[in-house]
């Protein structure tokens, strides 16, 4: 395979890579916008459709279609909401893009606004990323001064504003309708769909909600053409993709690759292999909300379709690598603590179910589990899946169902021996679980 | 219960729910600088959508006073032109707002999977012993508040600790005690957040 040349993150390690001057000099900065403004908005949507760009936030929905659904014949204003609420455990790719290549996102926002007929884009950034927000605010300011944002951009008569909006600590705000609710100044809780945001989104106006990495691909597609994009990676899974690799590897980090790269290449070549050369036990390929994969699936290409075929999901491409010291009951407990804390509380099965799952897992992990608890875990999980407004419920039950399916023997051993059978040295003997 | 005018009404006296009432707090208004910042921020949203600025307005109030009191929330309600109940509705949902006084340094340890795999549970334990408080508490001198938070989104630099708005990355359990000492003596200079030297680090 020919060496892959990164396009999104090629310069992120270089000095001043976040500045406007650097972007203009080294990345053909704002040429995509200049070109886009000579095209008809609908032509841009057609180009993005032809490229087959799929949303990088987790669902993998075709971006061009999402834009096409945005209501056209309406007197209401339209909006682009950029989802920068990166909170999926194991995901940190947007963090790097915004911190080291912010102008690519700003340009992507401007082109997307032009394509769907919006005049305003809000970048909803999670509250914890304040240091990233400061960089973006400063760079947006420079883009205004240079005439790439604001009134009559590059003399085309097109006006566009890009604003930052800071969240305040809520995983659920990453769900597109919950993000809109939060932007409107309410609790980040999902809405009933339909109507979809494309019809009635922000302020009940037509809205497209797109992930940071998705929008960063837009200037590249406009500039290099859809054929260039589809030529990278396998069919229907084209384009550059960022993979976040964390956990028990030697070099955790963000790696850019085409989606025909296998999980083995990502973990053993790019991330340097297993920490301490220990054996691999399992991989979570797409952020904490997707089913686990086993070492015998390492040769699966890391694409949306191939991972789905292998029984999991690419999700946000957050690979969490687990070695043989990881207790799967502990893992489920750790993640259910997360889901219990982050459940927005709107749907009863999720709000109550996550709490019960966490309590049951804590009981089993601390050695007080009873044989009937395993069936109870299964029952509670299945009473959450498919019974909630958004995908959170399914996501929360996944760590339990997936570990029970693949590692049931570990659960049984915990109950039988009345203790955790795999207490790893990197864990605390008595984790301090504060009440929430 | 009667609300006859002759009867004294006091929310504290008749409060029956499990929800704790917010601390009343002293009189609160924005400083002129914060008022100017708020006015600039609210202009980013359509004129009839002032409520969009509520998170920003709450951050301003919290930064001005350290935490949010009932008086601060009432002031935010006045600015947003909504009811104090709507403000409390928002405050009680988001984790980054405090309704009790917090220490000078709010130490947030990420406890979710990727950080936990690299020793975050032990980091919390070490920090807890070094500071002398349990997670969720503030020490007697008001210097440190220790909190456990969910995934901060920098799993490659695990374990991650966020102190106020600054980050400290790759904090091994063995370094945790020294880190507390450094915060005491050096303040902000103790943090290694990548953005602090973003021009050289990859």
Image: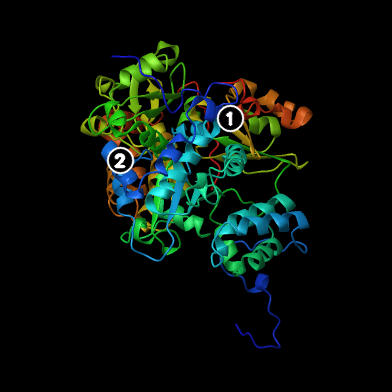
Instruction: State the residue at coordinates (77%, 28%).
Output: B186
Q: Nearer the viewer, residue A100 or A113?
A: A113
Q: Are marks 1 and 2 in contact (CB under 8 Å)?
A: no
Q: Nearer the viewer, residue A396 or A156?
A: A156
Q: Return the residue at label 1.
A: A21
Question: What percent of the width, then of the height, locates residue B12?
Answer: 67, 70
Task: Measure how far apart labels 1 and 2 are at the Cα level.
Answer: 28 Å
Which quarter of the picture shows residue A296? top left
Question: What percent of the width, then of the height, locates residue B94?
Answer: 55, 52
Instruction: State the residue at coordinates (61%, 54%).
Output: B56
Task: Specify the subunit that label 1 lies on.
Answer: A
Q: Is residue A147 visible?
A: yes
A380 relative position to A366: left or right: left
Instruction: State the residue at coordinates (24%, 27%).
Output: A234
Which quarter of the picture shows residue A389? bottom left
Q: Nearer the viewer, residue B201 or A244?
A: B201
Sequence-first tag of 1 and 2: 1
Question: What percent of the width, then of the height, locates residue B195?
Answer: 61, 29
Which quarter of the picture shows residue A218? top left
Q: Which secondary structure, mark 1?
A: helix
Q: Return the residue at label 2.
A: A47
């Amino acid at each position: 395979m020919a060496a892959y040349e990164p396009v999104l993150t090629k310069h992120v390690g270089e000095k001043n890579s976040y500045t406007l001057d650097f972007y203009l000099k080294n990345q053909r900065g704002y040429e995509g916008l200049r070109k886009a403004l000579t095209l008809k908005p609908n032509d841009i949507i057609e180009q993005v459709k032809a490229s087959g760009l799929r949303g990088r936030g987790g669902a993998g929905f075709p971006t061009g279609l999402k834009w096409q659904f945005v209501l056209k014949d309406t007197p209401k204003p339209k909006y682009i909401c950029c989802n920068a609420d990166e909170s999926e455990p194991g995901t940190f790719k947007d963090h790097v893009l915004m911190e080291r290549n912010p102008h690519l996102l700003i340009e992507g926002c401007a082109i997307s606004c032009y394509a769907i007929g919006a005049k305003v884009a809000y970048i909803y950034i999670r509250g914890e990323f304040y240091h990233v927000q400061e960089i973006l605010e400063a760079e947006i300011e420079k883009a205004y001064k240079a005439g790439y944002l604001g009134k009559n951009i590059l003399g085309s008569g097109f006006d566009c504003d890009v604003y930052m909006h800071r969240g305040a600590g809520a995983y659920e705000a990453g769900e597109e309708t919950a993000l809109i609710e939060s932007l409107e100044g309410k609790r980040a809780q999902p809405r009933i769909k339909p109507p979809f945001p494309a019809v009635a989104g922000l302020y009940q106006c037509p809205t497209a909600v797109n992930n940071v990495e998705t929008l960063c691909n837009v200037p590249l597609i406009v500039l290099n053409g859809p054929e260039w994009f589809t030529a990278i990676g396998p069919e229907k899974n084209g384009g550059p993709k960022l993979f976040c690799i964390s956990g028990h590897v030697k070099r955790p980090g963000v790696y850019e690759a085409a989606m025909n790269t296998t999980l083995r290449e990502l973990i053993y070549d790019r991330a340097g292999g297993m920490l301490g050369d220990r054996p691999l036990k399992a991989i979570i390929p797409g952020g904490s909300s997707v089913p686990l994969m086993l070492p015998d699936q390492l040769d699966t290409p890391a694409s949306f379709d191939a991972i789905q075929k292998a029984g999991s999901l690419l999700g946000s491409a957050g690979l969490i690598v687990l070695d043989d010291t990881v207790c799967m009951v502990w893992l489920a407990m750790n993640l259910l603590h997360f889901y219990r804390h982050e459940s927005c509380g709107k749907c009863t099965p999720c709000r109550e179910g996550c709490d019960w799952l966490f309590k049951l897992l804590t009981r089993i992990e601390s050695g007080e589990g009873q044989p009937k608890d395993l069936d109870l875990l299964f029952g509670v999980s299945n009473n959450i899946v498919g019974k909630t407004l958004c995908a959170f419920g399914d996501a929360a039950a996944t760590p339990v169902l997936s570990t029970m399916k693949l590692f049931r023997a570990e659960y049984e051993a915990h109950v039988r021996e009345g203790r955790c059978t795999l207490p790893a040295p990197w864990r605390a003997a008595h984790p301090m679980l504060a009440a929430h | 219960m009667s609300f006859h005018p002759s009867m004294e009404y006091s929310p504290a006296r008749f409060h029956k729910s499990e929800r704790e009432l917010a601390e009343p707090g002293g009189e609160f208004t924005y400083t002129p600088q914060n008022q100017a910042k708020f006015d600039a921020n609210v202009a980013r949203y359509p004129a009839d959508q002032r409520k969009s600025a509520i998170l920003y307005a709450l951050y301003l109030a919290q930064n001005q006073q350290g935490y949010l009191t009932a008086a601060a929330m009432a002031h935010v309600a006045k600015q947003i032109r909504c009811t104090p109940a709507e403000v409390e509705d928002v405050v009680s949902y988001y984790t980054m707002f405090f309704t009790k006084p917090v220490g000078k340094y709010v130490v947030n340890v990420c406890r979710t999977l990727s950080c936990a795999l690299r020793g975050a549970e032990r980091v919390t334990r070490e920090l807890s012993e070094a500071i002398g408080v349990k997670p969720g508490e503030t020490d007697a001198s008001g210097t440190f508040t220790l909190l456990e938070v969910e995934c901060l989104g920098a799993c490659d630099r695990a374990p991650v600790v966020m102190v106020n708005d600054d980050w400290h990355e790759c904090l091994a359990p063995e370094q945790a005690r020294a880190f507390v000492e450094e915060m005491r003596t050096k303040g902000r200079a103790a943090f290694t957040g990548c953005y602090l030297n973003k021009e050289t680090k990859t």
